């Protein structure tokens, strides 16, 4: 349980807040690269700041203040020129550093004037990697954009969903192993039974219970975050679930899955009440195989609601979304009752506080990458379930690999197949124990 003030300190990422300062020490994805192909300007609200992302005709990306320095109109309606973004109102133009580089009428009237040199809007660094556009909104010198191991040799695609809740609710879920058993296992299977029985397709009691009950949970802080471990059912500490585990990358990324099919889930604070959740899916090439580079990494927008207005609840990721969103925009942690299952949550909150203090004292927080050698390929721990490489399973992803936009149905099949491949009416391999960890 936290006091109201502690809760606010831990959750607010607005400029100038301690957590806002901590978040501004890391790179965050802000859009999929292909989004800029559809439209070369994009309004974004990130860490409580209103910005415009644009791609000029030379291909340079810029992330600058959403409002023009002249008379404050929205630059997302501007025109990307060969180099820079031109405001549509009076033609002032800004480059990716935020510098005003043209003021047509002022330059006509005062050919030798230096007005534009004194005009600048806020601008942040952006960098593209693996089909994502990342931004760094903190002090210089900027650290390196981390090259995580799964960014190498495989195929990927990206799903984005906007969630009406604070980012910390998403992250605390990732430090909470026991919810897998109940939210996804018990509730998820209960939903499947209901749906199957309604369709009359299967005997409702043929579903296994996933996973086996948790017997033990554990957490270890490592260079880039926290490794989460669990012992369930008849397994012991020699099982990958405990011996290897999987990481939460500080401050707000979950890495989960297997080495053939995994995802990095980025929880990017839009502001204190909203989170942009970008899942970067990765399908690794088989050993000895070299993945042909993808021309484009597909991106799709993930729906949150059913047609009747209820939250989608029958997909694994959406079950998490239901939990986070129904905690409210910003969960009232002054009224919670924490137990043994929450020790990862407690550890993570302490880690956040410690790292906020380090930044406040002028230090560098954990996991910031500055060594190019280290950044060639940062290996991450992950339980390895070889049977997730089943060809029938990987075959489902050919649509993504072909580069066509994924449909909602693709998304459903993906999510379902990554954890609940046991559905008897689908031609699927037997469910691997431990699939769909979260
Ligand atoms: S408001 Fe942008 S140029 Fe005038
Ligand atoms: Fe989950």
Image: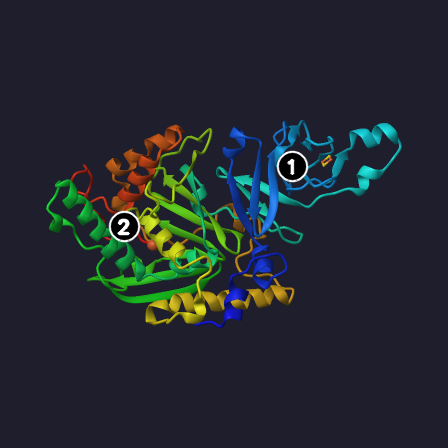
Residue 294's disc number: none
Label 1 lies in ligand 1 vicinity (Cβ under 8 Å): yes
**Residue ID at (63%, 30%):** 56
Residue occupying the far left of the picture:
203
Where residue 306 sits: x, y (%)? 33, 43
Label 2: element kind:
loop
Where residue 312 sits: x, y (%)? 33, 46
Residue 435's disc number: 2
Do callouts 1 and 2 mark residues in contact (Cβ within 8 Å)?
Answer: no
| 251 vs 156: above or below | below
Answer with the quadrant where ligand 2 appears in the image.
bottom left
Where residue 82 sits: x, y (%)? 67, 27
Please identify the quarter of the rendering in which residue 404 is found. top left
Residue on which the image places disc 1 = 75
Please identify the quarter of the rendering in which residue 117 is found. top right
**Residue ID at (17%, 52%):** 208
Q: Compute the Cα span from label 1 to label 2.
A: 45 Å
Looking at marks 1 and 2 on the same chain, the residue that comes earlier in the sequence is marked by: 1
Decide: few, some or many residues near mark 2? Use Cα within 10 Å; few <14, some 14-19, many ≥20: many
Position of 347 with respect to 81 (left or right) is left
Q: How many marks?
A: 2
């Amino acid at each position: 349980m936290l006091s109201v003030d502690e809760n606010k300190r831990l959750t607010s990422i607005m400029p100038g807040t301690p957590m806002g300062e901590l978040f501004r020490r890391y790179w965050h994805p802000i859009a999929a690269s292909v989004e800029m192909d559809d439209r070369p300007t994009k309004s974004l609200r990130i860490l409580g700041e209103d910005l415009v992302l644009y791609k000029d005709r030379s291909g340079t990306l810029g992330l600058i203040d959403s409002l023009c320095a002249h008379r404050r109109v929205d630059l997302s309606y501007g025109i990307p020129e060969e180099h820079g973004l031109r405001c549509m109102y009076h033609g002032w133009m800004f480059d990716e550093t935020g510098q005003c580089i043209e003021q047509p009428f002022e330059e006509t009237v005062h050919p030798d004037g230096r007005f534009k040199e004194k005009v600048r809007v806020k601008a942040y660094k952006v960098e593209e990697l693996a089909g994502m556009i990342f931004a760094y909104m903190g002090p210089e010198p900027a650290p390196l954009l981390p090259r995580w191991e799964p960014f190498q040799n495989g195929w990927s695609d990206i799903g984005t969903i906007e969630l009406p809740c604070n980012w910390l609710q998403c992250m605390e879920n990732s430090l909470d192993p026991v919810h897998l058993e109940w939210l996804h296992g018990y509730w998820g299977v209960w939903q499947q039974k209901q749906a199957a029985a309604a369709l009359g397709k299967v005997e409702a009691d043929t579903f296994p219970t996933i996973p086996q009950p948790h017997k033990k949970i554990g957490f270890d802080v490592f260079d880039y975050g926290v490794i989460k471990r669990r012992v369930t059912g008849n397994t012991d500490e020699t099982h990958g679930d405990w011996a290897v585990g999987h990481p939460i990358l500080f401050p707000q990324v979950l890495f989960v899955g297997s080495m053939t099919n995994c995802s990095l889930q980025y929880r990017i604070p839009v502001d204190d009440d909203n989170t942009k959740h970008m899942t970067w899916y990765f399908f690794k090439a088989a050993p000895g195989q070299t993945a042909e580079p993808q021309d484009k990494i597909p991106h799709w927008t993930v729906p949150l609601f059913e047609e009747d207005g209820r939250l989608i609840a029958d997909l694994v990721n959406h079950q998490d979304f239901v939990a986070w969103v129904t905690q409210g925009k910003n969960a009232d942690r002054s009224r919670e009752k924490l137990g043994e299952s929450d020790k990862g949550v407690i550890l993570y909150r302490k880690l956040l506080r410690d790292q906020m203090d380090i930044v406040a004292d002028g230090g560098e927080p954990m996991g910031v990458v500055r060594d190019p050698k280290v950044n060639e390929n940062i290996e991450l721990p992950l339980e390895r379930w070889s049977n997730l490489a089943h060809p029938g399973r990987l075959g489902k992803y050919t649509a993504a690999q072909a580069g066509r936009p994924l449909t909602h149905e693709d998304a459903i099949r993906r999510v379902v197949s990554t954890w609940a491949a046991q559905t008897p009416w689908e031609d699927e391999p037997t469910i691997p124990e431990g699939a769909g960890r979260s």
